[in-house]
Amino acid sequence: MADPSSYRPEPGQIPDSPGVYRFRDEHRRVIYVGKAKSLRQRLANYFQDLAGLHPRTRSMVTTAASVEWTVVSTEVEALQLEYSWIKEYDPRFNVKYRDDKSYPYLAVTMNEEFPRVQVMRGHKKKGVRYFGPYAHAWAIRDTVDLLLRVFPVRTCSAGVFKNAARTGRPCLLGYIGKCAAPCVGRVSPEDHRELADEFCDFMTGRTGTYLRRLEKQMAEAAEEMEYERAARLRDDIGALRKAMEKNAVVLADATDADLIAVAEDELEAAVQIFHVRGGRVRGQRGWVTDKVEEITTGALVEHALQQLYGEETGDAVPKEVLVPALPDPVEPVQEWLTGRRGSGVSLRIPQRGDKRALMETVERNAQQALVLHKTKRASDLTTRSRALEEIADALDLDSAPLRIECYDISHLQGDDVVASMVVFEDGLARKSEYRRFQIKGFEGQDDVRSMHEVITRRFRRYLAEKERTGEWTDEEAEPGGETGGEAGPGPVLGDRDPKDRDLKDRGLKDEDGRPRRFAYPPQLVVVDGGKPQVAAARRALDELGIDDIAVCGLAKRLEEVWLPQDDDPVVLPRSSEGLYLLQRVRDEAHRFAITYQRSKRAKRFRAGPLDDVPGLGETRKQALIKHFGSVKRLRAATIDQICEVPGIGRKTAETIAVALARAAPPAPAVNTATGEIIEEGEPDTTAGSPGEPVPAGAPEERRGQET
């Protein structure tokens, strides 16, 4: 626990102007981001007597080890910079609403030649029109099913679309009239885009004009005695009205507005948002957050506005935003919203009428969400706390292991040997911290040596980070080279020159407080295995001079917990929450390692002769295969024919021809007993071996067992 006076700036050093400040901990992680109209006055509040601070604020300033600030010109700039830094650094003491990526939207891909209607989640893409969010994906599909009768827009995937275009036959929806079938040319791209525009117009609330037009067409068809056409129009009108009934009118003046309500107690807050477009509720979503700082309702509203509109522009920001309390000051927030929309935005508290009544409904939803969340979380928090305490007691640790790292080795009979590292913080998986390793120190199968290598590489990187950031002096730091080979969920990184300590291009972004890959130590290292694996992990840490990290192993057979200094295992009760947490950590490490090992194996199986051509990327490989149709035809082509492919020069064509010649398939095998030519992968049944033979291209699962 740090003393705030040890890093308190001199009063004259802090400028009396708007700005954004960051508190960092001893590992240089940003733990809190805030903005202020006057940095001097705001920061002075953090360095008063600890007894006068709110408990959460006191916890933050004692966890921090330094503070820094950035001066800006206006409060609007401070608001924008604060939002950017909170998204970038994910500070643990800031209010963080649960991200809304799980909420489904109805999306129309207007950026495609033939726009597609579909359910979308995640970040919004440029050129795609979104409607929602909806509480459930099935609600979107029900609405789309009704509207496709009137607006038969494409809903199929790119693969289905291309297959239909190739065969000249539309899918089922094209046959039953729920798709205009642009894949087979029933409508032109222009007519199909017009259908998509009408679909979007209807979804945005412009329904009255379209319904009146359909009713007029129905009456004209009846007068002309085209009764079948009139009946179809009647059914279309009924489908549209049924779709409209799903979103009842709540504001009679066709208002576009978002209503935000907050329910809170001393520890947590729930936020509910209703999206009203054209007077109808078009979407609803909600978040729950821990109040890790002393914060007012107005400040909670401000954070919710940042979350909602931080990445939105144009009509996605409504003309009117109704809130239960206004941020203080309100002018910068309102100016920021206006800038995001491009026109005026009204931010106010509804006082009377329909809007006040609807706000009360939103508030009731927020209260119910908070009650439901507390009911679910009470047992979860208690269980996780008990699990960590049981682990600390069983392993004789000084405190509960808030950060646990688990390692597992995976291979297939000694091939593609890899390792995984998973991280659990406060008993919950932290997937952004997961890492993967390739075993490079030796060939073959040796789980003990592999575990020693992985632990050494991981914690050598940790020591290098401490040395580079100045947390250790040069005398204290462990000398040695780079570890290489570690990677996150992306491609695996290769070895690196030991003298290159910057590592910024590898994601170790240190000075700015962004997450660094191996910078933070765990309180407990768990290895998947028994006493040999535990001893290897402990030996690796001892060789690096690390003695403040506990190590244990969890053996699969009897679920025994092994400690490096004990000859006998620690046996936790089967009903122990601590054992259950260790099992979850171990199983997650095993899953992550197996997934990586399988992906490497699949990539090796998919490798072709073109992969060995230096400088030939994926785009030009695809161009070659598309031009010639197959590797066999490409192998038979001349250098001049290869040069006809766009992007392929003569030198590259010669390299391709040489590589394909070297990788030419061997001559067919001959059965010497019968003189019969054996096709590749065909079993030779003359040997008399019992059982089903394994073809040459069979999956590896049939040849060995994964570990």
Image (spheres, grey):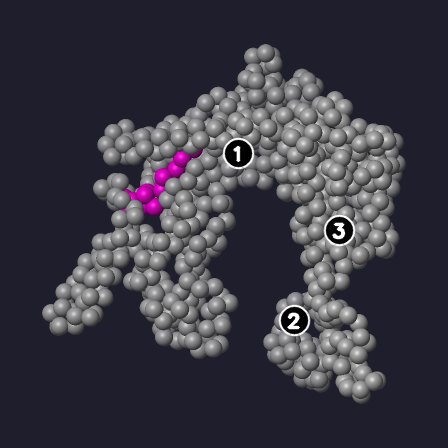
Query: Which quadrant does the N terminus fall into?
Result: top right
Q: Residues within 10 Å of mark 2 (few under 14, many from 20)?
A: some
For image coordinates 60% across by 76% down, the residue present is: 626
Three-letter code, disc 1: Lys
Is 281 magenta? The answer is: yes
What residue did someone put label 1 on? 96
Q: Is residue 675 left or right of residue 162?
A: right
Q: Is residue 417 above or below residue 640?
A: above
Residue 258 in which image quadrant: top left
Asked if the residues shown at circle 2 and circle 1 are in contact, with their CB atoms under 8 angstroms apart, the answer is: no
Q: Is residue 202 left or right of residue 113?
A: left
For image coordinates 43% across by 37% down, the residue present is: 286
Nearer the observer, 515 or 605:
605
Q: Is residue 414 above or below residue 550?
A: below
Q: Which residues are magenta?
A: 271-282
Three-letter code, disc 2: Arg
Question: Where residue 588 appears, x then y in whole percent?
Answer: 67, 43
Q: Residues within 10 Å of mark 1 (few under 14, many from 20)?
A: many
Nearer the observer, 271 or 647:
271
Mark-to-mark CA distance, 3 and 2 = 37 Å
Q: Is residue 137 visible?
A: yes
User: Helix, strand, or loop for circle 3?
Assistant: loop
Residue 663 in which image quadrant: bottom right
Three-letter code, disc 3: Thr
Q: Is residue 8 visible?
A: no
First of labels 2, 1 by sequence position: 1
What residue did someone put label 2 on? 620
Question: Where residue 542 appears, x then y in whole percent?
Answer: 87, 34
User: Helix, strand, or loop for circle 2?
Assistant: helix
Q: Is residue 540 left or right of residue 303?
A: right
What residue did someone put label 3 on? 707
Question: Where residue 424 appears, x then y in whole percent?
Answer: 66, 36
